[in-house]
Amino acid sequence: MSNINNRIMKAIKVLSNVKLAKDTYMLEGMFLSNIYEKPNPFSFFMVWVPRVDEIPLSIADFDEGEIRFLYKIKGEGTKALSNHKGSIIGVRGPFGKGIKIKPGIGSRWLVIAGGIGIAPIPYLVKTWKIYEVQFDILWGVKTIEEIFDIKTFFPYMERSRIIITTEDCHYKNGYCGLITDALKHMNVKDYDGIIAVGPNNMLKAICLDLYEINPYISLETIVKCGIGICGSCYIKSSDKLLCIDGPIFRCSEVIEYLKSNSSNS
């Protein structure tokens, strides 16, 4: 089970909440108490939007009581969250193990991010900076309207190489087509590790294509309580709960779940 402090709702003041691209926002908040725990990359908070909903959001950045979330409007909860500026919201967490591995000094990693799957990547890059990791980030979106200059908002990503692919083919400085099509132009064996994050249909395709490499993936599923009691995030065909054991898994751990549950969500 999670740390008892993680289960307690903590107040955050929204310092800014800006639109970066189509339906995509960045919220910066400050904890109003010093009762918080430094999260691991890919762990997440349950964010309470007063009188509307509680939603899971991964962490885009964290620094001494200040936190940033990148999120996309997908429902009533995120829509209401986008209207919060200068107000108070609540968070519980962080939940999930995230990713705890220590990469090799100077190692090369490929990150495959589909859509708003880019959200937890800045904090990963920041956390692994001490290991001098070289990142290539393949970021796939449906339309050019979803693209924003992530390095402007997260300067510590300056050394990361970002390759963009769009399904509408209107972005001239990247690939045209699905992110899995662009992946075929890359030599995955050049990397010391691979992490994929995005919708489950994308993760399924990547796990099947790269099964021998067995990359890390950040899985998506329904999350309600965040503390392993309700069972809503149980990953079928496994013994895993996303809120306790994830959201990072190796493909081999969850491939059966992906085969039966992949969707465009």
Image (cartoon, rainbow, N blue to C red):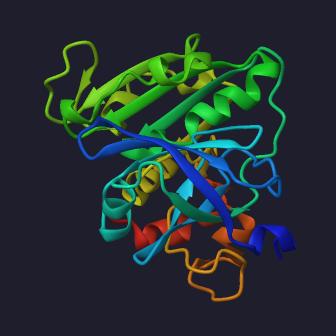
Q: Which residue is drawn at 57% across and 48% down?
A: 211
Q: Which of 222 and 45 is in front in this view?
A: 45
Residue 247, visible in the rendered structure: no
Q: Where is residue 169 in the image (x, y as percent from the top left)?
A: 15, 27
The C terminus - image quarter: bottom left
Q: Position of residue 93 (x, y in %)?
A: 71, 63
Q: Position of residue 78 (x, y in %)?
A: 37, 61
Q: Tell me: residue 100, above or below residue 226.
A: above
The N terminus - image quarter: bottom right
Q: Position of residue 63 (x, y in %)?
A: 72, 35
Q: How many marks?
A: 0
Q: Which residue is drawn at 37% across and 43% down?
A: 25
Q: Which residue is drawn at 54% across and 23% down?
A: 154
Left or right for 175, reference 12: left
Q: Residue at x 44, y 49 (%)?
A: 198
Q: Nearer the viewer, residue 179 or 141?
A: 141
Q: Residue furthest front?
A: 86
Q: Nearer the viewer, residue 57 or 168?
A: 57
Residue 144, visible in the rendered structure: yes
Q: Tell me: residue 40, above or below residue 240.
A: above
